[in-house]
């Protein structure tokens, strides 16, 4: 890693750390980009050079999730096969987030601060839109199938994360990755292979 890249990584980390500290201290709404810049000792313009918004600085891993999932090239031609591939990649990313990011601190904020849900929802919409568009472009899924697959992947990530956040706040010792696996297993129990939601009604 060159000096320029080392500086970039260090700056990304410092801005993210300062944002998280400020949001913990005073809440997301009260935190401004100006305050983040002052805490790091840089200008607001520099903050925007690295992050598009304070929300992006708070949860930078979400863009990585979008990039990783939209780059998955499944060899399957069915919706359930493509979904399995995407969930497998999501699991790896989830494990990485747990190890590399301030996962527990952000998880607690999700439960404690209602405005955090707005941020998460906005980022989820971006993920669903980007992933479903990519799936349609690559084929063989139709638009509705691609949208459903993207929604299921996104919901699985959210449910696992929120389950962990709730247990963390309640003081329950839990394994985030185990919760992700449990979420996927429950999804499989709800919709076994070959069975689609509402099939009984349709018949």
Image: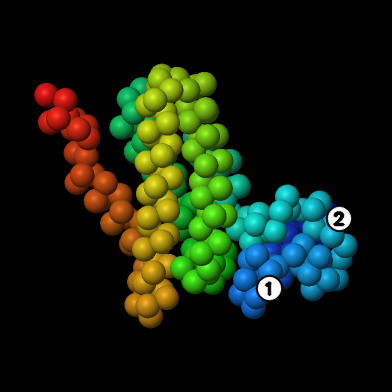
Q: CA distance from mark 2 to mark 1?
A: 19 Å
Instruction: Pinpoint residue 60: horizontal percent, then vertical percent.
Output: 63, 55
The C terminus lies in quadrant: top left
Residue 100: quarter of image: bottom right
Q: Earlier in the sequence, mark 2 or mark 1?
A: 1
From this viewpoint, is residue 199 visible? Answer: yes
Give 50 or 24, whichever is nearer the viewer.
Answer: 24
Q: Is 120 displayed left or right of 171 in the figure?
A: right
Per the image, label 2 sits on a secondary structure element best described as helix
Q: Is 91 displayed left or right of 109 in the figure?
A: left
Q: Residues within 10 Å of mark 2 (few under 14, many from 20)?
A: few
Name the residue: 34% across, 38% down.
Answer: 84
Q: Is residue 167 above or below residue 83?
A: below
Which mark identifies residue 45? 2
Per the image, label 1 sits on a secondary structure element best described as helix
Q: Count the marks: how many?
A: 2
Residue 80: quarter of image: top left
Q: Is 91 displayed left or right of 51 in the figure?
A: left
Q: Residues within 10 Å of mark 1 (few under 14, many from 20)?
A: some
Instruction: Pinpoint residue 173: horizontal percent, then vertical percent.
Output: 36, 77
Q: Are marks 2 and 1 in contact (CB under 8 Å)?
A: no
Q: Is residue 68 above or below residue 48?
A: above
- What residue is shown with label 1? 22
Instruction: Pinpoint residue 145: horizontal percent, then vertical percent.
Output: 37, 26
Name the residue: 36% across, 63% down.
Answer: 163
From this viewpoint, is residue 68 visible? Answer: no
Instruction: Pinpoint residue 154: horizontal percent, then vertical percent.
Output: 43, 45
The N terminus lies in quadrant: bottom right
Give 139 or 57, whichever is nearer the viewer.
Answer: 57
Q: Is residue 18 above or below residue 121?
A: below
Give 54 or 161, whichever is nearer the viewer.
Answer: 54
Name the residue: 73% across, 60% down.
Answer: 12
């Amino acid at each position: 890693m060159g000096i320029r890249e080392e500086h970039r990584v260090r700056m990304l980390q410092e801005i993210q750390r300062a944002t998280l500290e400020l949001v913990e201290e005073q809440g997301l709404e009260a935190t401004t980009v100006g305050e983040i810049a002052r805490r790091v000792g840089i200008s607001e313009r520099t903050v925007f050079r690295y992050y598009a918004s304070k929300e992006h600085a708070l949860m930078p891993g979400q863009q990585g999730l979008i990039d990783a999932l939209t780059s998955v090239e499944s060899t399957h031609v069915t919706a359930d096969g493509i979904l399995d591939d995407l969930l497998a990649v999501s699991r790896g990313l989830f494990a990485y987030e747990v190890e590399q990011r301030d996962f527990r601190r952000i998880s607690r904020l999700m439960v404690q601060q209602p405005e955090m849900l707005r941020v998460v929802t906005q980022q989820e919409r971006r993920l669903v839109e980007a992933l479903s568009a990519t799936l349609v472009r690559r084929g063989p899924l139709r638009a509705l199938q691609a949208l459903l697959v993207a929604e299921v992947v996104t919901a699985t990530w959210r449910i696992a994360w929120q389950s962990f956040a709730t247990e963390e706040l309640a003081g329950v010792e839990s394994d985030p990755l185990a919760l992700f696996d449990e979420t996927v297993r429950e999804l499989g129990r709800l919709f076994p292979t070959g069975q689609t939601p509402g099939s009984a009604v349709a018949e």
